[in-house]
Structures are given as structure tokens and as C-alpha cells.
């Protein structure tokens, strides 16, 4: 009976300790994903490729110690930011001036789309002007008979053009 009580107490103690450790491990992994390794590899802290990294190994150890002390995720990240600055974070905080980094790409895409639409409308409008227009009565306009005179050309230039056209025709 005493052995059953002891084994039951051990199982109960293990059951209580296990979720905390598992939660702590998930939190530990999550915090590592939100931080960048400052050794120069440009990887997140969790994926630093250096076996004996001078930054990642002590940082991971320190994160574990803070988790064991009961500090929250925000407190741990805030402490690293306080020490190393925002460069310790894998992504900038979504507040203040940093929010422009999240918004500007969408504004640029919308602006570019607006520009493409404007250009397409101009090109479509220019093409429509070149086609023969239809009068309001629904009848097509008759082409003007060739008189040999160019529109918009006057004086000596018109005379010279008329003369050259006559030479070309003969």
C-alpha cells in the first residue's frame, strides 16, 4: 500500500512537472524564432549554423535561465532589446516609425497599379482618336478628296510639296 502511494505521488509529480517543461520548451523555441543571431550569420537564433557560436549559445542559455525564473516572453525580448537594441529582433516591432516598413510595400504596389491603369487608359484613348469617327447621325464620314494640299502647311512649303507630288505622279 505504501509502495502504491509513493508511485502514485511520483507519477502525479511527474505529470505536474511535464506540462511546465513542455510549455517552457515551446516558449523557448518561439522566443528563439523571434530573435536574430548577432554573430554575423544573419540567421534566427534558433537556426544559427555555427557549432560554437559566441552569441547564440550564451543567449540560449540566458533565455532558459529567464524562463526558469518565470519571466514572460515579452520580458525576455524586452531585456535583449534593452541590451542589444532592436537589431536583436528578427522583425521590427509593429509600432511607431517601424510601421511604415509594413505599410509602404502595399502603398507602392497600389501606386504602381494606378500608374499602369492610367497609362493603359491614355494608350487606349490615343488609339481611339486615330480611328475614323462616326458622326452623330450614324453615317460614316466620307474621306476628303485629295487636293494635293497638305493640312497645316502654308506658303512656299505648300507650293514645293505640290510641285514634288506632281513630279512623283508623272
Image (spheres, rainbow, N blue to C red):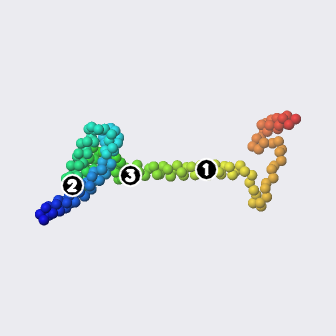
Q: Residues within 10 Å of mark 2 (few under 14, many from 20)?
A: few
* Residue underneath mark 1: 120
Residue 67 is tagged as: none
- Mark nearest the camera among 1 and 2 is 2
Q: Residue at x 48, y 49 (%)?
A: 108
Residue 81, given in percent of the width and then of the height, sits at 28, 47
* Residue underneath mark 2: 70
Mark 1 and mark 3: Cα distance apart in space: 32 Å
Quarter of the picture containing the C terminus is top right
Going from N to C along the chain, the mark reached first, 2 or 3, is 2
Residue 34, given in percent of the width and then of the height, sits at 32, 49
Residue 99 is tagged as: 3
Mark 1 and 2 residues: CB-CB less than 8 Å, in contact? no
Drawn side of residue 138 relative to residue 90, left or right: right
- Mark nearest the camera among 2 and 3 is 2
Which quadrant holds residue 158?
A: top right
Q: Residue furthest left?
A: 2
Residue 127, given in percent of the width and then of the height, sits at 68, 49
Vertical arrangement, residue 170 with respect to residue 146, above or below: above
Q: Residue at x 19, y 61 (%)?
A: 12
Residue 43, given in percent of the width and then of the height, sits at 35, 42
Q: Residue furthest right?
A: 170
Amino acid at each position: 500500500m505504501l509502495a502504491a502511494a509513493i508511485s502514485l505521488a511520483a507519477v502525479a509529480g511527474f505529470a505536474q512537472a511535464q506540462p511546465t517543461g513542455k510549455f517552457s520548451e515551446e516558449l523557448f523555441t518561439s522566443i528563439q524564432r523571434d530573435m536574430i543571431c548577432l554573430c554575423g550569420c544573419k540567421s534566427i537564433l534558433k537556426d544559427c549554423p555555427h557549432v560554437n557560436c559566441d552569441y547564440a549559445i550564451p543567449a540560449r542559455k540566458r533565455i532558459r535561465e529567464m524562463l526558469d525564473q518565470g519571466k514572460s516572453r515579452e520580458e525576455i525580448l524586452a531585456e535583449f532589446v534593452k541590451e542589444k537594441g532592436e537589431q536583436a529582433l528578427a522583425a521590427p516591432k509593429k509600432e511607431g516609425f517601424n510601421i511604415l516598413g509594413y505599410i509602404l510595400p502595399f502603398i507602392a504596389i497600389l501606386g504602381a497599379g494606378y500608374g499602369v491603369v492610367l497609362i493603359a487608359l491614355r494608350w487606349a484613348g490615343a488609339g481611339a482618336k486615330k480611328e475614323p469617327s462616326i458622326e452623330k447621325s450614324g453615317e460614316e464620314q466620307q474621306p476628303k478628296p485629295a487636293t494635293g494640299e497638305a493640312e497645316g502647311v502654308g506658303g512656299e512649303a505648300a507650293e514645293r510639296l505640290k510641285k514634288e507630288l506632281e513630279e512623283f505622279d508623272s
